[in-house]
Amino acid sequence: MITLTHYLVLAAILFVIGLIGVIRRKNLLLLFFSTEILLNAVNIAFAAISKYYHDLTGQMFSFFIIAVAASEVAVGLGLLVLWYKRNGTIDLDSLQEMKG
Amino acid sequence: MEKYLYIALFAPIVGSLFAALFATTPKKLFVGVVTSALLALSWFASLKLLFYVNGETVVKAKLFNWISAGNFHLDFGFVADQASVIMMVTVTTVSTMVHIYSNYYMEHDKSFNRFFSYLSAFVFSMMILVMSDNFLGLFIGWEGVGVCSWLLIGFWYHKEDLPREVYPAISPSWAANEAFIMNRIADLGMLIGIFLIYWNLGSLDYDVVFAHVGSLSHTTVVLIGIFLFIGAMGKSAQFPLHTWLADAMEGPTPVSALIHAATMVTAGVYLVVRSFPIYQTIPEIGFIIAMIGAFVAVFAASMALVNNDLKKIIAYSTLSQLGYMFVAGGLGAYWIALFHLMTHAFFKSVLFLGAGNVMHAMHDELNIKKMGALGKEMKWTMIIMTIASLALAGIYPFAGFFSKDKILETAFSSHHYILWAMLWLGAGMTAFYSFRVVMLVFNGKPRYKEIGAHPHEAKWYAIAAMTPLAILAIIAGFFEHDFVHYITEFLPEYEPHVSTGTFLFLLVVTLGIALGGIVFAVLKYRNNNLKDLFEGTPIHSLLANQYYIPNLYEKAISKPYYELSKIAWEKIDMKIVDASVDGIAAIIYKLGGKSTAMQSGNLSKNLKWMVVGLVVLLMFVVFYKPGM
């Protein structure tokens, strides 16, 4: 029997994986992946709790998050391509133009 | 009738504000004229009230609700009853004449307009003091006259400080500060007295307080009486808070005449008279007041015996006369205290104005040893000052005779023979020093030629302003009967009971010592003799140096206080307060310096910090339980 706890543990594990990815990865593309993992970890938690309480609000919220994530990736990838064309790298450490 | 009350109260402040408009501009004659006219208006309104008020009708006016906090309600109210109306008339009479006189005295001063602004503001504060119907209003006026006194003593604030050995009063601004600070000390006592009244009775209105004073325990009333009298001691310069009055002579002479002789310094006496229901229930405190008064009467008169400064002699004489008033007030003869206050205001103010004429004639020289024979050049001034001196000495039929004699009679009839003997001795000294001044200034050889002075009589309107006061100094005593009748509708009656034989004996003895003092002074200083009493002996230097009390205060209080302040500044303020504030700032500054490393601009590092923040917030959410 898969209970709410299992879902939440899965969500937590995914969130930690995403978080480690955000901290450790220097590649901008992988950073996007990590962000997606983070968001989807939250989505799983939302959906599971929504089912548990018989309340659709959580699932609706998940849809919003998916929509926002999709648009974010669309904009972000566009910028990323632009950055690669200009600098020839998508390493995070190269993104330091504003340092005083 | 409320209309007249408001006119009497507000005419001076209108004049003051009007003069203040021109405060920084050069002399404008109309400023002096307008303020004098407004004072005359106030005087007229006071006279109207004087004839209107009687046993049945007392004029009261509530301006507005002043303080309303919790259970505490106080109206900004004024009252014109017998006691305050007598004070109003005295104050406005002297003020009006002094304002007119100041037009002459200050005519060449570059701050002519500013002077009139201050002087009228003083009269306004004094009117609040005497007309208020509650203790807090009285206190406001009390502080107001203190501020105006400070402004006026320090009127020539630009004069340099001199060492005490060279010039005992140091400088006008020093003297102004001394007066202000000494009064602060006394005002603290007065404030405590007022707090005690409110604490125990829940009200500050005279009517309420005096009606319920009997319900208080004896100790409470004693405390209230003592603290209120401490306030009175400061304003009326009683020992040991007396040193400021002699130094206050640094102010322009009309200021000395108005504030430091006729009105402000008598506020303490007025306070005791006004609070008679309090002092009536504590005769033992009254007796202490009388003892202090008698001591000051002799103490101040003795300092006047050998002083060479014209204004200071008159200042000591004021101190001494204030002592007489406190004896009367302390012994329960409130109307006699008020009567002496009134007659004293007239003859002492005119004595000061005469001294002002002499100062102008002598180009601000005050040493009476350098004058002499001024009577030839200044006939009117001599006549007026002689009249005032006779009144001060208490010679029949001048005003001082009636009031001072009554005080001596009071002391004798209440079996305080030692007090009587002190006052009697004081009367002799008063007569002596008054005529020492008259002899040294107006008679003898013209010693002023040595310092190249060219004396001249004052202008006619200065003499004209002095004349009414001089006339009052002669005739005020004859109103005694009407005065008693009028004032005892408000104040308790008091008549010294002595047999006719004793009365005549006292009369002869008192008049005898006064005349003796005069004759002694005249004989001693007749042939241009400049040798003083006790000259060359230690007593002389003791008296001439004011019993070394100013030196003592400087060494025992001012210097240690200064050292203490220095320690507080260097050790406490700099090393603890400032250091801790600076320390906190330094820690934050250093933290800031260290934490700039976080702002590397590297996105990856920023993300890591973001995660740290997230973890901290999460921990907070998980572990923080409100209400634990």
Image (cartoon, coloured by chain):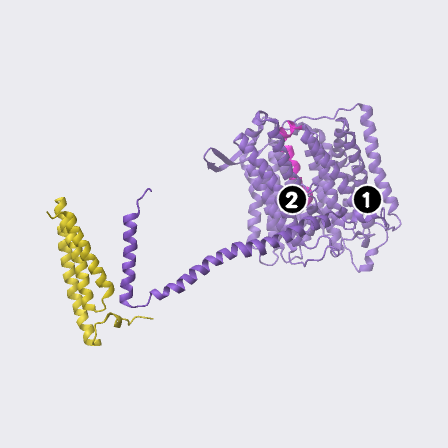
Chain colours: A yellow, B purple
- From this view, report whether residue B265 is shown above or below residue B478: below
How far across and down, in percent of the image, does residue B77 sit? 53, 36
Judge whether residue B590 is colored magenta.
no
For the stretch drawn in magenta, what is the main secondary structure? Answer: helix
Name the quarter where the N terminus of chain B is drawn: top right
Residue found at x 74% / y 29%: B410
Choose between B23 and A78: the one closer to the eye: A78
Q: Disc 2 marks which residue?
A: B95
Disc sitting over residue B435 in the figure: 1
Tag 1 secondary structure: helix
Label 1 resides on the chain identified as B
> Is label 1 on the same chain as label 2?
yes
Please report the residue visible at 27 percent of the width from the left and 59 percent of the height from the top.
B611
Task: Please state the horizontal and vertical placement of residue B274, each as a whole percent of the image.
Answer: 62, 33
Q: Magenta stretch containing residue B277, yes or no?
A: yes
Q: Is residue A71 visible?
A: yes
As shown in the figure, which amino acid type bears the numbered disc 2? Ser
Q: Nearer the viewer, residue A72 or B400?
A: A72
Span highlighted in magenta in the image:
B260-282
Decide which of tag 1 and tag 2 comes sooner along the chain.
Answer: 2
CA–CA distance between discs 1 and 2?
A: 26 Å
> Does residue B112 appear to the left or right of B69 in the view shown?
right
Give, as a three-letter code, the residue at label 1.
Phe
Q: Position of residue B430 (x, y in %)?
A: 79, 40
| Outermost residue toward the left in this view | A1
Q: Which mark is residue B10?
A: none
Q: In the rendered structure, are the residues bearing label 1 and label 2 in contact, judged by CB atoms less than 8 Å apart?
A: no
How many C-alpha atoms fall within 10 Å of the one at disc 2: few (<14), some, or many (≥20)? many
Q: Outermost residue, top direction?
A: B499
Q: Look at the picture and state if B492 lies above or below A6.
A: above
Picture mark count: 2
